[in-house]
Image (cartoon, grey):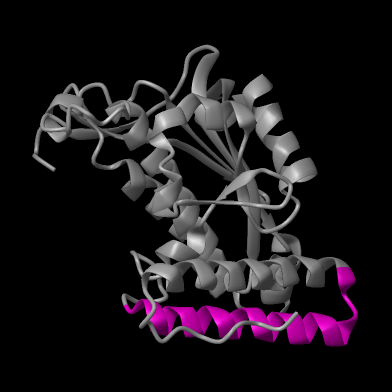
């Protein structure tokens, strides 16, 4: 970043149609109480600081009018809200995508926006897993007012409703209007999304295990680490008889198995972990 560039956030002064990411950290209340009781407040700080850092990183390459912009971001209680204006990449499109294939039907601006959303979501989901925490949420397109510590609007309500009523399991889904908005930019064959049995698509965060995460750069080693985390939590919750929490981790185990099967179709020689028996 050059010396004359200053960081700003994408804040609104009125309702604005935006890409909205709403994420709930499942079990965050117990995480705080447990670490507070054990005198391990630094663990909580380590967990929460990461979010602001990673969200900033996700928007850092967006340059417009000699500024480096960041997404508008809030973390309150167990909820995370991140929003991007839909036209935030207009200033960099000519530079970054000047040599796009003329046959490529993807809109470069929307493609960049979608990738920023995927980067933010996967970073947060994988970070939470390192602390034995699950996340669920929704990515949608809608009207929202989002400035500093104030955020409200029908778009946020839609994102929250999808998170609490539809996502249910540790997945971040795309609302139907978000899916329609991105259209050609959703290259499903590249594996960034997976479709669940209810028809909704969710971000395939396991794909990014070894990309800028604490799991390390070796995918196979990261895959083994993730399996250990899932198996450990299933055993503990099963022994404690916590059925509600157990169901979430069992869903993750099924997703783990499904992702592995898909990955081995294109990378048959990889030494991945064995399936998790649920």
In this view, 61 is above or below 24: above
Q: Is residue 84 left or right of residue 22?
A: left
Q: Is residue 277 left or right of residue 210?
A: right
In this view, 102 is above or below 266: above
Residue at image location 76% in from the left, 51% down from the top: 168
Residue at image location 53% in from the left, 78% down from the top: 226
Query: Toward the viewer: 30 or 162?
Result: 162
Can the viewer see residue 116? yes
Residue at image location 35% in from the left, 46% down from the top: 58
Residue 262 in picture, x, y percent from top left: 50, 66
Residue 31 in picture, x, y percent from top left: 69, 69
Query: Toward the viewer: 137 or 224?
Result: 224
Asked whether residue 203 is drawn in magenta, I would say: no
* Picture quarter with the C terminus: bottom right
Residue 61 in picture, x, y percent from top left: 23, 41
Query: Toward the viewer: 227 or 201?
Result: 201
* Picture quarter with the N terminus: top left
Which span of residues is magenta-colored?
A: 218-243
Q: Main secondary structure of the magenta part?
A: helix
Q: Is residue 109 left or right of residue 66?
A: right
Residue 233 in picture, x, y percent from top left: 70, 80
Asked whether residue 233 is drawn in magenta, I would say: yes
């Amino acid at each position: 970043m050059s010396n004359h560039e200053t960081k700003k956030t994408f804040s609104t002064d009125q309702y604005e149609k935006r890409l909205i990411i709403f994420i709930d950290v499942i079990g965050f209340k117990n995480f705080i109480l447990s670490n507070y009781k054990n005198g391990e407040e630094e663990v909580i700080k380590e967990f929460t600081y990461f979010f602001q850092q990673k969200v900033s990183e996700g928007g850092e390459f967006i340059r417009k009018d000699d500024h480096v912009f960041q997404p508008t971001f809030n973390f309150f209680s167990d909820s995370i809200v991140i929003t991007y204006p839909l036209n935030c990449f207009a200033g960099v499109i000519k530079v970054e995508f000047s040599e796009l294939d003329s046959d490529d039907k993807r809109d470069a601006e929307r493609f960049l926006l979608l990738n920023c959303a995927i980067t933010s979501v996967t970073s947060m989901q994988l970070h939470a897993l390192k602390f034995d925490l699950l996340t669920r949420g929704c990515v949608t397109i809608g009207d929202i007012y989002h400035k500093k510590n104030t955020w409200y609007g029908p778009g946020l309500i839609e994102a929250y409703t999808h998170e609490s009523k539809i996502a249910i399991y540790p997945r971040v889904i795309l609302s139907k209007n978000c899916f329609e908005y991105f259209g050609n930019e959703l290259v499903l064959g590249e594996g960034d999304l997976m479709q669940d049995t209810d028809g909704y698509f969710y971000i395939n965060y396991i794909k990014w295990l070894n990309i800028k995460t604490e799991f390390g750069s070796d995918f196979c080693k990261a895959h083994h680490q993730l399996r250990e985390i899932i198996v450990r939590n299933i055993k503990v919750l099963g022994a404690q008889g916590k059925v509600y929490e157990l169901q979430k981790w069992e869903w993750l185990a099924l997703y783990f198995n499904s992702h592995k099967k898909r990955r081995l179709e294109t990378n048959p020689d990889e030494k991945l972990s064995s399936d998790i028996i649920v």
